Amino acid sequence: MVDKIAYPVQLIQPDGRRVFRPDYTSLVRDIGPDQLRDLYEDLVAARRMDVEAVALQRQGELGLWAPLLGQEAAQVGSARALRPDDYAFISYREHAVAYCRGVDPGVMTRMWRGCAHSAWDPSSVNVTNPAIVVGSQGLHATGYAMGAHLDGAEIATIAYFGDGATSQGDLAEALGFSMSFNAPVVFFCQNNQFAISEPVHLQSPVPIAQRAAGYGMPALRVDGNDVLAVLAVTRQATQRAREGSGPTFIEAVTYRMGPHTTSDDPTRYRAAAETEIWKARDPIDRMRRLLEREGLLSDEFLARVQATADAVAARLRSGTVEAPDPAPLDLFDHVYSTDHPLIDEEREQYAAYLAGFAGIEEALS
Ligand SMILES: Cc1ncc(C[n+]2csc(CCOP(=O)(O)OP(=O)(O)O)c2C)c(N)n1
């Protein structure tokens, strides 16, 4: 697979034409008109959901949000390659992965609103809550994959992370360990060209996938804005994992069209001209062009997509603004599974601090 590093796998060109790649087309032979339409719907719903979350942050309803704008195809294509019993370990930007796994959009913002440590029960959808510690989920995924294998489960585990994460020690350990033990894990890197303000060429002088090749791990690059190509390569990698052929590294070459988070201003470190180039490779436009070329777009279908996307966004909004504020002292719950003297002490101190404000509001009014 190492020869695939130079040329990212592509099945749909930016103008919507198919690419002749029998080796990868065979992996998505079952994706007919209905499935193509469903993928398009996922892409549109994911973007709509993300735009709604950014608006909620601007309206003061969320503390922070990490937009996925531009990365919809990388996330939808890979998540739709997973089987229900596969397991995904995500970072803070994989909202579309969570959506495709079945996470309720109504709880998706809880962590970002600061009202829950864990927004959903990971075991109910086989996707973790977002990992903020960059690269940590590579190790978690490797450990989970090893455990699942020892339990006799024939599943694939997938770790999502960015280009910047590949410089973390955690990822280096995960790659080395998983190769040594042939762990059934897929390392899915979304190379969105930036780690906050650091461009990928500063991160690595060689393609990111080549870093994995250094561990002897099969690695390939895929056009991350091509949902079909991403689906194909992820199916191949997860199948390798399930049948005991070990880990695979996928570099999905994409672009973060928005800021790193809602606290970031990308105009300070990248040129508008560059963003324009990537706009022409927009993953949703590409899929729409394919549907158009193949006669699969109708007003009725587009109305259905719009209705789904609006419903998802409405659910995200109502779930956010209606989420109950936790009691301040809940902060100390679940730090340990049992009582802990240090936590008890901190809880008491904080309670005393809060009590010091009693009556202040009345006095000021
Ligand atoms: C261990 C660790 N170091 C630093 C940070 C601060 N930080 C948050 S996101 C980020 C950049 C990560 O970039 P990348 O891995 O490319 O993912 P992207 O945000 O582009 O999706 C950094 C340095 C962190 N959260 N965790």
Image (spheres, grey):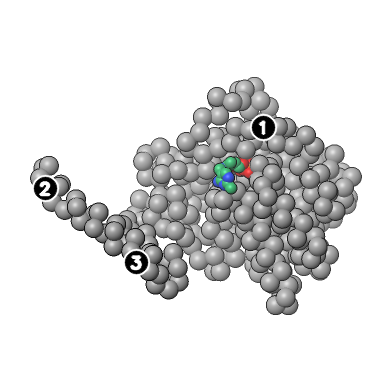
Q: CA distance from mark 1 to mark 3?
A: 45 Å
Q: CA distance from mark 1 to mark 2?
A: 52 Å
Residue type at mark 1 is Pro
| Residue drawn 20% across the image and 56% down it | 355
| Residue drawn 47% across the image and 60% down it | 118
Q: Position of residue 347 (x, y in %)?
A: 32, 62
Mark 3 lies on residue = 344
Q: Is residue 4 left or right of residue 339?
A: right
Residue type at mark 2 is Glu
Q: Position of residue 169 (x, y in %)?
A: 68, 50
Asked whether the viewer can see residue 281, the reply is no
Mark 1 lies on residue = 199
Marks 1 and 3, the one that precedes in the sequence: 1
Q: Which part of the image, by quadrant, shows the C terminus?
A: top left
Residue contact between numbered discs 1 and 2, judged by CB atoms under 8 Å: no
**Vertical position of residue 226 compared to residue 318: above or below:** above
Q: Position of residue 332 (x, y in %)?
A: 37, 62
Give the structural element (helix, strand or loop) at label 3.
Answer: helix
In the image, is the residue at mark 3 within 8 Å of ligand 1 by its beta carbon?
no
Q: Is residue 42 left or right of residue 320?
A: right
Q: Is residue 143 left or right of residue 184?
A: left
Marks 2 and 3, the one that precedes in the sequence: 3
Q: CA distance from mark 2 to mark 3?
A: 30 Å
| Residue drawn 80% across the image and 37% down it | 206
Give the structural element (helix, strand or loop) at label 1.
Answer: strand
Q: Residues within 10 Å of mark 2 (few under 14, many from 20)?
A: few
Residue type at mark 3 is Asp
Marks 1 and 2, the one that precedes in the sequence: 1
| Residue drawn 48% across the image and 54% down it | 108
Q: Position of residue 203 (x, y in %)?
A: 70, 36
The disc placed on residue 362 is 2
Quadrant housing residue 63: top left
